[in-house]
Image: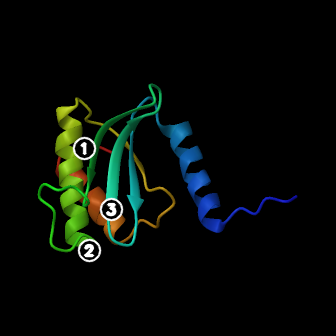
Amino acid sequence: MVKHVTPFAKRQSRTRHRLKTNAQGRPRLSVFRSGKHIYAQVIDDEQAATLATASTNEKEGKPAKTYNVEAASQVGKKIAERAIAAGVKQVVFDRGGYIYHGRVKALADAAREGGLEF
């Protein structure tokens, strides 16, 4: 039986492989984008632990529209301040196979403005 791998899964696998080879011990800022929400996590792969999370699905400070660029930039600012509070300053950006455009780019730019380095 031949297992069919989707183009998205291939792109995601390539992205994660590049991150592992270039990470240099830094945690990764992982992004998941759905139709209605966007989620971000700072993950330490060496300890298999999540250090900080932020999303548009949180009860506190939930934007009116959770699926636009402004909401994604708010999540980027939240994840930056929570990561810095957890003692993380440098991360590797894991776009998760998504194209670096629109909401993903807005989240990354806001995280950079918030003080994260990647």
Q: Quadrant of the C terminus?
A: top left
Discs 1, 3 touching: Cβ within 8 Å: no
Q: Is residue 90 left or right of residue 49?
A: left
Q: Position of residue 46 (x, y in %)?
A: 47, 27
Q: Which of disc 2 and disc 1 is earlier in sequence?
A: 2
Q: Is residue 93 above or below residue 82?
A: below
N-term mark: 3 or 2:
3
**Count of marks overlaid on the render:** 3
Q: Residue pushed farthest right?
A: 1
- Tag 2: residue type? Asn
Q: Residue furthest front?
A: 59
| Tag 2 secondary structure | loop
Q: Which mark is residue 68?
A: 2
Seen from the viewer's position, the closer of residues 57 and 89 is 57
Q: Amino acid at mark 1?
A: Leu
User: Pointer 1: what residue?
Assistant: 116
At a point 47% along the width and 64% down the height, the residue shown is 98
Mark 1 and mark 2: span between their CA atoms?
22 Å
Displayed quadrant of residue 74 = bottom left
Please state which amino acid type lies under the numbered disc 3: Ile
Q: Earlier in the sequence, mark 1 or mark 3?
A: 3
Picture coordinates of residue 19 (x, y %)? 51, 43
Front of the two marks 1 and 2: 2
Question: Which part of the image, by quadrant, shows the N terminus?
Answer: bottom right
Quarter location, residue 102 = bottom left
Q: Which residue bears the numbered disc 3?
A: 38
Secondary element under disc 1, as helix, strand or loop, is loop
